[in-house]
Amino acid sequence: MIPYLNPALAVEERVKDLLARMTLEEKCDQLLQTTIGPDVNPNNVGDGGEFRPTIGSILSYFGGVHKRNEFQRHAVEETRLGIPIIWGMDVIHGWRTGFPVPLAQACTWNPETVEAGCRIAAKECSAEGIDWTFAPMVDIPNDPRWGRVMESFGEDPYASGVFARASVRGYQTADPSAPDAIAACLKHFAGYAASEGGRDYSYSDISARKLHEIYLPSFHAGVDEGALTLMSSFNDVTGTPAVVNRYLMTEILRNRWGFSGFVVSDWDSFRQLKAQGFSADPEKIAIRCLSAGNDMEMVSECFKLLPGLVRSGRLDAAIVDEAVRRVLRVKFRLGLFEHPYTEERPLEATALLPAFRETARKAAQQCAVLLKNENDLLPLNPDSIGSIALIGPVAADAAALVGNWRGNVDPATVPTLADVIGEYFPHSRIVTAPGCGFESAGDDGIDSAVEAAHKADIILVALGEEWNRSGENCSRSDIALPAVQRLLLRRLAALGKPIVLLVTAGRPILYPELEPCANAILHLWQGGHEAARACFDLLTGACNPSGRLAMTFPRSMGQIPIYYNEHRRARPDQGYYHDLEESPMYPFGYGLSYTRFTYSDLTLTNELVAGVKVTNSGERRGTETVFLYLSDPEAELTQPVRRLIAFRQLDLAPGESGIARFELDKMRDLAYTDPNGERIFEAGEFVLSAGGLTLHFDCR
Ligand code: BGC
């Protein structure tokens, strides 16, 4: 048997054998990715790609399994070496079964939920011929004007790392060669979320300290978990575009972190170097991008020049070999040589299975954040409600529940709030009306909605962002809901009935104007396929809200950027805006429950095991996320006021107590990262805090 085709041999041996057999052209073709057919990403203006059977990768879902197998047959059976193609696609929060958007998933604070969602997405998309997802996005945003906050796990670097790991486990599993496992791609490396003013694709000026302290740890966590690929980003890192940043992709990623998979560039990012003012010369771009550490060019143009550059002596063949080695390594690890084809199965057998929808429903229940619950209006008792009005543009809109980057989720299969409300209030008179459109008055008008609502015992107002208001290239100078929706809420509030406000959005929105108009507020995010049922599960108390914000909600646009882990200031009591209350509208970690949790006994042993007792002192079972923060009051490099170092969930019956225990590590948890990325431990005083308790301790 030819060694590289022998699955009994180690991957490195197979790579070595195959590489030795390849011509320069065959090698360089492995570094190309083409796109075929229509792209799911409307921002990607592509020329459509050129297919050749020796190509490394295809970014497309065009034609499904049948087409994949046809292309793959050309590659595997009609080329000299039969190297399989790897199919990549944006599978961001589900493929056929829609899960909450990643920012919402982070608000579950439940890594198992995140892992389970990615696992299902991997099963569904691998069944349709996708080997590799361009996810998770582990950029750290602190500016909700940036539309891509929806794809992130929120503002905290540590939490983002935990969810990066969970995603990698879910997509790749312990055995990435399993036919239903796919390769993950940590993106966008690095600092993309720092785009100035939240304007997508803009310049980002990132200090070395911030790079290492904030932007890199989530990538490091994902690499440590075994992510097979990364995507380089569009932005600049203080003058050097990320896509030609050797420090990032070679010194840090490969030399320091030992990453052995491959890096793909982002859509057209090589040619964008012209617009960024780096170079318009495709040859120079090809040399610099490859040498910096990109291995595959998404929608390749510049890498087509690689063979000529090697032949003319301008590019060292060893650099090409190294990149090819990385691409082949991933193909072997994914088992593509053993199972290049995808079995053609009916969709009913692979997609939207009842168990998948059930998992999506749990995720949607866990991600919704209860922001207000005046006089315990919620949960509602359906037996005591004679009539109920469901008003707002989200009421009968499925797409708003799913959000952007929805893969192949078909909104026609997603039940809306209006579809399911009757299941929960079988004895109530129910009226529904949109009241207005998402952005404009719409046909039915506010008056008729107010008229429909005025006889109801309670009004549910379902407002939100239209599905594509958040996402890539969806920057906004104002994150308030559109004026017409705010007007609708004010008009309904004037009726003087109890109001429950339900909000779908892919980002934090401005609540100050909405808050006084509602007695209860549930921020649903974009919860996916079962968001509507999950919403009513929560409203009726079938389950207890446990979501907590993974991103700070500001009071006004002028407060942005705002995030919980800000660094200490010179005058803690001065310097705040004179025209605004200093606190955020809803802080990081905020979220109410139908029960109460009381904290006591925050302790720390000499072995650095922290513990805190939590008691459910209310009347309902509930899940509490215990956040453990660290402060370091004195250090050579100033520290954030506090930073999250661990979190854990406790599920407690009424009256029950539990202890959240955390094994801390001096270098991991008490040390800080310096501008070179080194961990520095300074002996001295530290402060732990959890649930309003603090504990001062000394560590040498
Ligand atoms: C986005 C990436 C995405 C790629 C392919 C780019 O515009 O920045 O996140 O994976 O397109 O759709």
Image: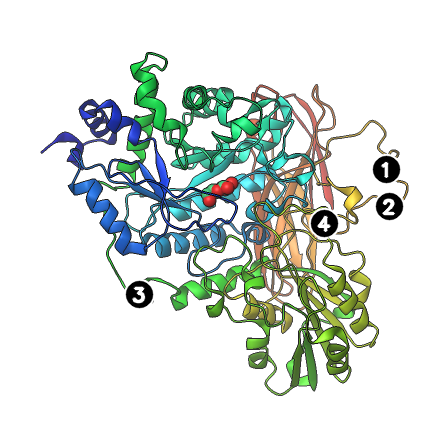
Which quadrant holds residue 263?
top left
Label 1 near label 2: C-beta < 8 Å?
yes
Q: Amino acid at mark 4?
A: Phe
Q: Amino acid at mark 2?
A: Leu
Q: Which residue is mark 3?
A: 349
Label 4 near label 1: C-beta < 8 Å?
no
Q: Which residue is mark 4?
A: 553
Q: Which residue is mark 1?
A: 576
Indicate which disc, 4 or 2, sits on the residue closer to the N terminus.
4
Q: From the viewer's side, name the closer residue of 106 and 471.
A: 471
**Does the image show residue 338?**
no
Label 3 near label 4: C-beta < 8 Å?
no
Q: From the viewer's side, name the closer residue of 542 and 492.
A: 492
Q: Which residue is mark 2?
A: 580
* Mark 3, secondary structure of its residue: helix
* Mark 4, secondary structure of its residue: loop
